[in-house]
Structure formats: structure tokens, C-alpha cells
Amino acid sequence: MFWRRSRHEPAPEEEAAGPGAPGQAVEEPGVEAAESGASSPDPGTSSPDPGASSPDPGTSSPDTGASDPDRGGPDASPATAPGASPESSGEPGATIADGLQASRRGFMARLHGIFRAGPVDEATWEEVEETLIAGDVGARLAMDVVARARARRDQGGPEAAVRAELARLLPAAATGPWRPGRPDPSLPAVVLVVGVNGTGKTTSIAKIAARFAGEGDRVILAAADTFRAAAIEQLETWAGRLDLPVVAHKAGADPSAVVFDALDAAVARGADVVIVDTAGRLHTRHNLMEELTKIRRTIDRRLPGVTPEVLFVLDATTGQNGLAQAKAFHEATVLTGIVLTKLDSTAKGGIVFAIEQALAVPVVFAGVGERVVDLVDFDPASFVEALFA
Ligand code: GDP
């Protein structure tokens, strides 16, 4: 079930979207699945969240949504969901060691082979440098690592020296799993998820949302990537699978208006976390900066004092190119964390060292598979251990 505002009250940033733009909805796809077309006169009572006492502000007109042709999200069949796999099967997720198998067999195995091949000379070090570059460590960083390793006299020999120098590049182990900052517990934490389309942004949002919801948080998703109808539908489909509410407008609506409504809904329901999907196809840095600035201003107006976390989704298989994207986003808005996706699909796990050096933004999660459970907390010590195992 989902419902819409009967009277459209524009959010402060919404004017820019122009007349006739958004029709909004807060959807409860899980409830719809359970009630199958039943239309409740009181949206508030049909929330899966027992603690939610009031419906979203301004939402007054119940609407099954089943006949809305331009949206389709709520009716999307779970069978067509991305990465179809049963979330409720209780299957354990992949571990960081599983996710790094390809890298271990790839550039790390090659590194090991080089040192075992015979006496270490100039050519050996050149080959080490090439191997690190091929493993996505980056050219300049590879040169630095080799120079430093050559100057060391480790007990374990040159190979141990290279490993120690690589390990040095990662920050000290985090103190625990990443959580979004929430200085005022009476207000929700806000997480903006940014990144280029195709990197695994939506899947990562689903994984993170499922994680927090599983820990007892009330999570609301906001479909603020309004550039593509498909992006909205995809998030709605995930929300349905995970039984989480999602705030969505029509494609082409003002993303800030979506965020505003999501924050309203979050406050009304006493949500703990709002996770916002943002557009991944902004053609210029100027557009990107404008849009993210506007979203941040909306958050600031609606929830003064709440600073959003900004997680950048980086596809490990795109290597140095992904790093260039991250730099562009980092210039447009301050990133507070990286979600490194598809680590399982690359033999070039060296990208992690390059990220930490180039951005000094911590990798907080790693995606190690397509299932919603395939998300690991990124702990540098475990990463190094698994990579060098
Ligand atoms: P978006 O366009 O950035 O939202 O990307 P999607 O979330 O739709 O993901 C694009 C593709 O990458 C989908 O086929 C996902 O299943 C896949 N994907 C996402 N994360 C991972 C991951 O950690 N590992 C693997 N192997 N595939 C992933």
C-alpha cells in the first residue's frame, strides 16, 4: 500500500521542479504485499512499524497505487528484483576473505611469485612496481611503496617489506562497525549515498538498510535519484523485498523535495536513519555540486544541526577510473566514507590502498557479492590479513 498527498504542499526547494512536477508517495511495499489491495482508511495504522503513531505529514488520501501507470514500483514483483536471492533464507554473507579470493590469486600471488623466482635485483623491483600498478595501487604510489620497501631490512626479506609498506598505507583499524553520526538521538541520522550509475549504489543502499534494520533501527529510504524512473523503481523494489518504507516522487521531480518529504516522514515516525539515493548521472561537476548543495541545504532547514554522512559508492572493478570519479565527488561535497563494491569481482584489490592515499576518506563497507547479506564492515587489519593470507 502507498498513499499520496491529496493537496500538494511544495517543499521549500521544490519550486525549481516547476508546475505539475512531483506526485509524492510514502510507500509501505511490505504492507501492500501482506494486505494485497486492501485500502486502509488510516494510513498510520497500517504501518509495519508498531511505534509509528502518525502518518506522514500531509499524507491524507489513501491510495492503493495499483493503477498508477507512471510508477510501477509498488507493483513490481519481488521475483524481478535485482540480484534475486532470498533475504530471509538466513544464509550467511560472504566474508572479506571470500571477497578477496580473486585479488589473492591475482596480483598478490604474482607478487609472491616474483620474490620466489630468484635473487632480488633491479629487474625484480621493476616487476614488483608493475605488478602493483596492475593491481590498481596506482603508478605513483607503486613507486613510493617500492622505494620504501627497498630501503627496509625486514626479517622476512623484500616480500615482507612490500607487504609492510602496503599495510602502512591503510589507517589504523576502526574501533567498530561504521554507524552514521547522530548527535541528537531525537532526530534521525541522514546518509546520502552518492556515486555513478552501475557501481552498485542501489544494491549497497539495500545492503546497508537491511543491516541497520536488522540491528533494530527504523530505516526510511528516499528515492532522490529522480533522473531515471528505473532508479526509483529499483529502490522501491528493494524496499518491498526488505519491507522498508520508501519515499518517492515521480521521475523528473526535484530531488530536494523527495529528501524534504523523507525527513518529514522520518520525524513523524521516529525513524533512526534516512538513507537517500542520489542521482548518479550528473553531467557536469557544477550540476553535481548544485544538486548536492541543495539537498544539504534542505536537510539543514528541515533538521537543523543534523549533518549528513555522505557515502561514495566505488566499484572496485573500475580501478583508477573509479578513483577519479571519487575525487570529483569529493570536490563537489565532502565525502565521509566509501562503500567499495564488487571487491569479489576484481583481482585488483590494490585499489583500496590507492583510495586511502588519494582521498583520506575511510572505506567503511565492502560489497563482496550480489546478495543483500554480502556486505562486510571494512576493517583495514582484516583486509590486509585476508589479502596477504
Ligand atoms: P546502481 O546503478 O549504481 O544502482 O547499481 P546496482 O545496485 O543496480 O548494481 C549494478 C550491478 O552490480 C547489479 O547487477 C548488482 O547485483 C551488482 N553488484 C552490486 N554490488 C555488488 C557486489 O558487491 N558484488 C558483485 N559481484 N556485484 C555487485
Image: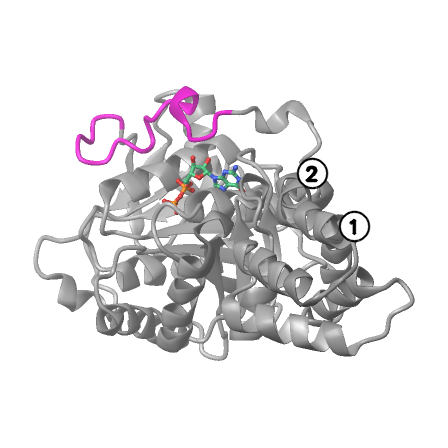
Q: Under tag 1, what secondary structure? A: helix
Kindly give the residue lying farthest to the right in the view shown. Answer: 155
Q: Under tag 2, what secondary structure? A: helix
Please indicate whether residue 258 sits to the left or right of residue 375 in the image: left
Image-quadrant location for residue 86: top right
Residue 373, above or below 250: above
Quarter of the image with the N terminus is: top left
Image-quadrant location for residue 354: bottom right
Residue 179 seen in the current view: no
Please indicate whether residue 195 sits to the left or right of residue 71 in the image: right
Comparing 350 with 208, the one in front is: 350
Please indicate whether residue 365 sits to the left or right of residue 255 in the image: right
Q: Residue at x 74, y 74 (%)?
A: 150
Majority secondary structure in the magenta region? loop
Q: Cβ–Cβ below 8 Å for labels 2 and 1?
A: no
Eye-nearest disc, 2 or 1: 1
Provide residue 7's location: percent of width, then percent of height. 19, 52
Crowd tier of the residue under label 2, counting other residues whose Cα lies within 10 Å: few below 14, some 14–19, many 20 or above: some
- The colour mode here is one colour
In magenta, the rendered stretch is: 66-84
User: Type of residue at label 2?
Assistant: Asp
Provide residue 376's location: percent of width, then percent of height. 66, 48
Image-quadrant location for residue 87: top right
The image quadrant where one finds ligand 1 is top left
Label 2: which residue?
Answer: 98
Earlier residue among tags 2 and 1: 2
User: Type of residue at label 1?
Assistant: Arg
Comparing 121 with 289, the one in front is: 121
Provide residue 33's location: percent of width, then percent of height. 44, 24
The mark found on residue 116 in the picture is 1
